[in-house]
Image (spheres, grey):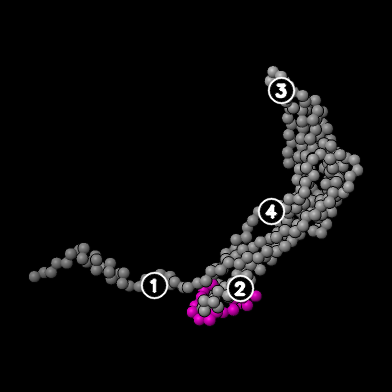
Amino acid sequence: MRSFVSPLLLLGLLVLGASAQADPAAPESHPKLSVTGSASVTVEPDVGKISVSITVGEKSVGEACGIAANTTDAVIKAAEGSGPGVTVTTTNINVQPNITYGPDNQQINSGFTCTQSLLIEVEPKQEAQLDAAISAAVDATLAAGGNYLQVSSMESALSDGLRRTATNQAREKAVEDAATTADILAKAAKVTLGDILSITDSNWAPPSPIPLASAGAAMDSAEFAPTPVQTGTTDVLANVAIEYAISSGGAGPAAEGGN
């Protein structure tokens, strides 16, 4: 008499047999310790940025834009001549009619206003000279622009090279901070620190300008006291995340090993 085995039963036995075998390719789970570290480095800015505008209102477009062009040319030459490392960029030119409304709500064109906006960038060779360089550039533009000139904003910033150097210094300190934290936690948990499994650097950030006091209004070209400027300092931050392999037992000297 022949015995009959159901195909479904046979399939079930094969599945059970396959699941009973260990998968040699499956990754082993290792205990690990994750920590973060942060640090900052204080530096003096080495770049100054001054936003100015020349605004002229006259009865005709030609008169307004002609005076604005001549004044702007004088401002550019004065700014660039105020010291080394000064560049000027035109950021906007705007011409608008001066519209008012009469008693019957009719439009009255009383003339035209022409505005030219400039960005003056100051980058002296030495960081310590930045305050004086910004002051000289501001005073030169005020004298050249007269009542047509308005200083809308001033700010200091870090050049790409200075920011990169400061960030790398902060990174080193952040790694030391993470290693110290790992050592403290490992000792408290009575485990031994092993190799570093991963390090994550999360330190990209756009330049952060530092606003300074602004003149904020048109200035007379008559004699005036030199503009005082104090750029101060700025902090460059760095953050890292580190994963350590750990095993049971006494803690290893992670902080000492990281130095």
* Tag 3: amino acid: Tyr
The nearer-to-camera label among 2 and 3 is 3
Can you tell which quarter of the image residue 73 is in? top right
Can you tell which quarter of the image residue 130 is in? bottom right
| Residue in view at x 83 percent, y 46 percent | 138
Q: Is residue 43 above or below residue 83?
A: below
User: Which residue position holds label 3?
Assistant: 101
The quarter in which the N terminus is drawn is: bottom left
The nearer-to-camera label among 1 and 2 is 2
| Residue in view at x 74 percent, y 23 percent | 109
User: Which residue position holds label 4?
Assistant: 208
The nearer-to-camera label among 4 and 3 is 3
* Tag 1: amino acid: Pro
* Tag 2: amino acid: Thr
- In whole angstroms, how far apart are the C-alphas of marks 4 and 3? 44 Å
The crowding category of the residue bearing disc 1, from other C-alpha atoms within 10 Å (few below 14, some 14 to 19, many at least 20), is few
**Residue 39 placement, left or right of 27:** right
The tag earlier along the polypeptide, 1 or 3, is 1
Q: Which residues are magenta?
A: 244-259
Label 4 element class: loop
User: Which residue position holds label 2?
Assistant: 180
The crowding category of the residue bearing disc 3, from other C-alpha atoms within 10 Å (few below 14, some 14 to 19, many at least 20), is few
Q: Is residue 149 above or below residue 171?
A: above
**Residue 244 placement, left or right of 108:** left
Label 3 element class: strand
**Where is residue 255 shown, x and y percent of the image?**
61, 75
- In whole angstroms, how far apart are the C-alphas of marks 1 and 3? 86 Å
